Amino acid sequence: MTVQDRTLHNFNILGFQQDLLSWYEANKRDLPWRKDQDPYKVWVSEIMLQQTKVDTVIPYFHNFLEKFPTVYDLAAAEEQEVLKAWEGLGYYSRARNLQHAVREVVEQYNGQVPDNPKDLEQLKGIGSYTKGAILSIAFNKPVPAVDGNVMRVFSRLLNIDDDIAQQKTKKLFEQIIHEVISHEDPSSFNQAIMDLGATVCTPKSPSCLFCPVQEHCQAFALGIEDQLPVKAKAKKNKTISYHVLQIRNENGEVAIEKRSKDGLLANLWQFPMIPVKELNGSPVEEWFYNQYGLRIKMGKKQGQLKHVFSHITWELEVHPAQLIVEDGTNHSLCFVPVEELSSYPFPVSHQKMMQYL
């Protein structure tokens, strides 16, 4: 007997499907990407929803589809235009990977999003969850779409205390949902599980008394719903301190630079950032001259910001500065009028600094 056989022993699959789908039909959320089953819209929404709340995504989704209504529009766009449309949504590699993959769809599949697992999973940025979401929601195929939300629901339903941070546990849930998913309406089934996790079977204080599948839930029967799912604690977040300089030249223009094409916040723009650790007690002006070949005079601190990423925290001290002399050395900075800054894609932390200009 396999693990999922043991887990699903005495689980009323048909009754569960009926209760879940009846509830979904009456209570499904009105979301813009549910207006039709366009695979491109489903794809964009699922990428945006990774690590991001629904309410945050909705205006971005509308704006993005207005700018890039088809795969052809997104494929033909400049990357900076795409990053600008994504500005503030975070995890910018999602936008770059989406555009890269859409270009593949245009070039290799005549603009048609593939409807089979093998071709879909070859596209950049599409993992097992996104693949399952597109195949089930857009193409109505009975394919699991398993993320943390879904694992939480099924951890409680089936009283599974395996660590959901481990890949093997995700595989187990994919096998389970492969057995449980509705073959008549897999699109609604997967979306129903998503809605159930978002509105009823929430991470803290789940609304068990209002749950449409309460009678199928082993955790509720045992009174242990608050103990599930089990998830190992993430590694401790590392803090890095920076001085951020808002440097003006004699024309009042402000210095900005483009971040590296690889790594965190790739290809976004920023005000120059100086790692405090690298100064080793030396003046900021001296470090800056050695790095950029520019003589500047730094002013007093104007503000302090903290920005938390999943793995690091930035502590940012914002200073005005004046360009004194440029010695002709090549550098990565460009000076732009303040009113033109809005046309460049900036990370959220640097958008917040605009108030100090």
Image (cartoon, rainbow, N blue to C red):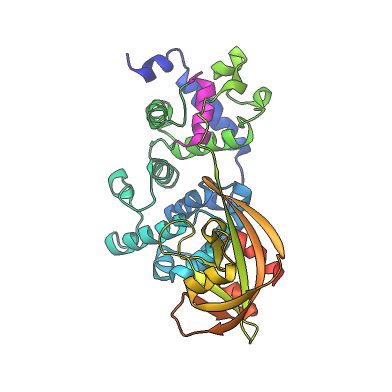
* Residue 259: % across, % down: 47, 65
Q: Is residue 75 left or right of residue 35?
A: left
* Residue 213: % across, % down: 57, 23
Q: Is residue 325 above or below residue 93?
A: below
Magenta segment range?
A: 146-161
Q: Looking at the rendering, in which quadrant would you find the N terminus?
A: top left
Residue depicted at 61% across the width and 59% down the height: 349
Q: Is residue 250 above or below residue 152?
A: below
Q: Is residue 259 left or right of residue 248?
A: left
218 in magenta: no
* Residue 288: % across, % down: 53, 71
158 in magenta: yes
Considering depth in this image, is 48 or 107 the residue closer to the camera? Answer: 48
* Residue 4: % across, % down: 38, 20
Q: Quadrant of residue 9?
A: top left
Residue depicted at 59% across the width and 46% down the height: 53
Considering depth in this image, is 139 or 242 the residue closer to the camera? Answer: 242
Residue depicted at 50% across the width and 37% down the height: 235
Q: Is residue 335 left or right of residue 264?
A: right
Q: Is residue 117 left or right of residue 41?
A: left
Residue depicted at 60% across the width and 62% down the height: 243
Q: Is residue 179 above or below residue 331?
A: above
Please state the total of marks drawn on the protein image: 0
Q: Looking at the rendering, in which quadrant would you find the C terminus?
A: bottom right
Q: Main secondary structure of the magenta part?
A: helix
Considering depth in this image, is 223 or 208 the residue closer to the camera? Answer: 223
Considering depth in this image, is 220 or 317 the residue closer to the camera? Answer: 317
